[in-house]
Image (spheres, rainbow, N blue to C red):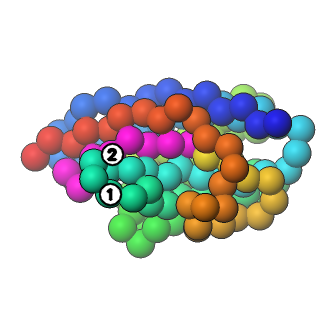
């Protein structure tokens, strides 16, 4: 069983920054990801981190602007989002899977409740 508790998000102007947090509790080795869903669109992979190794992967649309990281002591994964754009507006979900990284949304079995990020132009 995996429990995910998200926090962060909000309203920010274009060019601004936000940080999302996800508390993750599991007895199994896992990969944690941030996945977003904009209004009227399908869910989209954003970034992933393998808990054991710290290896990361990113969607091309966020490379160089977003950074995913983890704090082992706090069992928390972060998504630092810089230089935000209006097209980053979406509900952001923390998601987890047992095992290695995947960029496929369908590869994730556990989901947080989602947090809204709105970027105004």
Residue at the left extreme, as displayed? 121
Query: Residue sitting at 49 percent across and 52 percent down?
Result: 35
**Percent x, y of residue 32:** 66, 50
Mark 2 vs mark 1, foreground winner is 1
Residue 101's label in the rendered image is none
**Percent x, y of residue 64:** 40, 64
**Quadrant assignment, res 57:** bottom right
Q: Is residue 13 left or right of residue 56?
A: left
Query: Is any part of residue 49 visible from this angle?
Result: no
Residue 90's label in the rendered image is 2
Query: Residue sitting at 58 percent across and 67 percent down?
Result: 103
Callouts 2 and 1 close, C-beta under 8 Å = yes
For the record, the magenta segment spans 82-94
Residue at the right extreme, as displayed? 27
Quarter placement of the N terminus: top right
**Quadrant assignment, res 116:** top left
Residue 41's label in the rendered image is 1
């Amino acid at each position: 069983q995996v429990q995910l508790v998200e926090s962060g998000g909000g309203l920010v102007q274009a060019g601004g920054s936000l940080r999302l947090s996800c508390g993750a509790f599991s007895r199994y080795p896992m990969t944690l990801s941030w996945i977003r869903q904009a209004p009227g669109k399908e869910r989209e992979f954003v970034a992933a981190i393998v808990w054991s190794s710290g290896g990361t992967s990113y969607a091309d649309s966020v490379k160089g602007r977003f950074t995913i990281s983890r704090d082992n002591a706090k069992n928390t994964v972060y998504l630092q989002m810089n230089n935000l754009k209006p097209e980053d507006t979406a509900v952001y979900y923390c998601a987890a899977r047992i095992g290695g990284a995947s960029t496929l949304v369908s590869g994730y079995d556990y989901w947080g409740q989602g947090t809204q990020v709105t970027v105004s132009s």
